[in-house]
Amino acid sequence: MLGLMQDRPLLISSLLDHAARNHAGSRIVSARPDGSLVRHSWPEIAARAAQLAHALAARGVQRGERIATLAWNEHHHLEAYYGISAMGAVLHTVNPRLFPGQIAFILADAEDTHLLVDPTLLAGAAALADQLPPSLRAIIVMGSEADIPADCPLRGRFELLAQESLIAGQPTQFDWPELDERSASSLCYTSGTTGEPKGVLYSHRSTVIHAISTLQKDCFAIGAADVVMPVVPMFHVNAWGIPYSAAAAGASLVLPGAKLDPASLHRLIEEEGVTFSAGVPTIWTALLNWLRAEPGRRFAAPPRLVVGGTALPTAINAGFLKEYGVSILHAWGMTEISPLGTTNARKPENAGWDEDRFLDYARKQGRPLFGVELRIRDGAGAEIPHDGTAFGELEVRGPWAAAAYFNRPGDAAFTADGWFRTGDVVTMDELGCIEIVDRAKDVIKSGGEWISSITLENLIMGHPAVQEAAVIAMAHPKWDERPLLLVQPKPGMAPTAEEILAYYEGKVAKWWIPDAVEFVESLPHTATGKLWKADLKTRYKGRVAG
Ligand code: AMP
């Protein structure tokens, strides 16, 4: 017997309609490159999204057609998020920090027909002109005619349009189509630290369910009175779905643009009354260091933060909480899972813990949100015990996890029984909380046992002379692989290798302690700000442990 409930599809247009209809008092604030702010309301964003959709429809854009964006967090991008998906086309967000060759590959793989570009990124797009795919019919600059320089090299080669002129005079209402909720809504490529980037094709259904789920108390916990600032970029993993969840909540949005330095972020938090923000640890580390260097600066009302993308260093978490009253929730996710998978919010079992014990525990990535199923299997395919020590590869299943990559049938990341293999190596403890101990390709396999490079990196970050560190494997004649520690010292500091290694004593098993330390001026990072281990491995390829 079927239930007798209305079968309304879960559509991205419904998020926008909801926010515009019910939350006209919330604001969307965008920071311009010169630091000035532009303000809109949800109804105004909805009207401008409708105008963009009309303009694209007039250009013949069809359902399922991919429209790319190369842009920061600001209102034109938000309008593209809604206008493109809601009309039935596919929003393809492209990470401007990728290498030019990767951007060209991604645009060709997606067969984008239009590319929307932020004016500040136009020169970068122009440099790519020779590599842009033949599918591309037009480039739309996300601004006015004045934002397109007269000598722009793209002139004459592509149809070059300004978004403001394109939408001017278009109707501000769009009768959004009632799509199949499983229709593709947006496309985002993985960072591609090894091999070619792979496209994840989200659906309206997966996006809406993810958005609603992230609102819950043990995740974003945002409502209409919140002022939400996604620092995590809209060009990568949909800014953790915040453009959608903020609309579902009716919250205000503060979109910080390209300037993510601590002073700019702090100013936005204070002036706009930001109550909630999300970003990677690098952003918050920089903000904490900046605050400490400016003794008078505080938060009038400390915002709540959600941090993920790489592991949250305990020192940052403790510093924000104890010195500035800012509480941080550690979250884990991936492009392939929309991206939120787990958060480390408290459970009843943590109730009697003192602050320091929980701060230490918060280094773990957390437990699954409702809807996310986790399975952890060792190299032989057996599920590992949930004892907080045994490692295995994490697999995920759920309504907002990918079932396949775009254009790549049969990828080995998807198991025959319907799970996605994350490539993250994790433990799970008795409370069901996972801790990433490594990427499957980065663990150091020493004499058949695994050493977690990430554990060694996190520990050494607590050494007062260490700015950043990376641990990679070097070949060893007897043990196959042994850890090599690369350390970037803090400015003006010159620790010795002995001092650094002594820091590990008593903190890890003796055989985990790296065999050698190299001091470096800086460490390479990927386009999404993660340590670029593949590059380090190439650089230190010939290095053999003695
Ligand atoms: P991306 O698809 O670019 O968002 O990268 C996803 C990967 O980032 C995951 O597979 C993890 O390896 C890593 N990651 C995400 N969140 C965390 C976290 N909280 N701690 C450690 N690694 C993380």
Image (cartoon, rainbow, N blue to C red):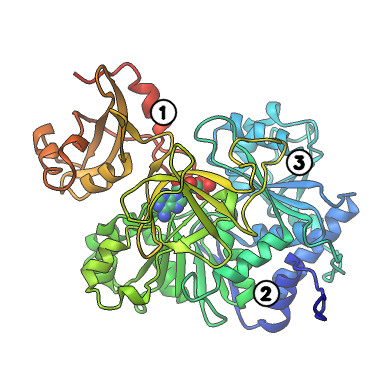
The local crowd at label 2, few if under 14, some if 14 to 19, many if 20 or more residues have their Cα within 10 Å, is: many
Q: Which of 455 and 323 lies nearest the eye of the viewer?
A: 455
Q: Is residue 46 above or below residue 393?
A: below
Q: Do the residues labelled 3 and 2 touch (CB within 8 Å)?
A: no
Name the residue that disc number 2 marks: 42
Q: In this view, does 144 lie above or below 46?
A: above
Q: Which of 532 and 51 lies nearest the eye of the viewer?
A: 532
Q: For the residue labelled by badge 1, is the local secondary structure a helix, a strand or a loop?
A: helix
The local crowd at label 1, few if under 14, some if 14 to 19, many if 20 or more residues have their Cα within 10 Å, is: some
Residue 210: percent from left, percent from top: 61, 64
| Nearest-to-viewer mark from 3 and 1 | 1
Residue appearing at x 84%, y 71% in the figure: 173
Mark earlier in primary sequence (3, 2):
2
Q: Residue 535 carries which label?
A: 1
Q: Which of 120 and 366 lies nearest the eye of the viewer?
A: 366
Q: Which amino acid does label 3 sit on?
A: Asp
Marks 3 and 1 sit apart, C-alpha to C-alpha, by: 30 Å
Q: Which amino acid does label 1 sit on?
A: Asp
The local crowd at label 3, few if under 14, some if 14 to 19, many if 20 or more residues have their Cα within 10 Å, is: many
- Relative side of 292 to 437, left or right: left
| Nearest-to-viewer mark from 3 and 2 | 3
Residue appearing at x 76%, y 41% in the figure: 112
Name the residue that disc number 3 marks: 112
Q: In which quarter of the image is residue 327?
A: bottom left
Residue appearing at x 61%, y 58% in the figure: 398
Marks 3 and 2 sit apart, C-alpha to C-alpha, by: 28 Å
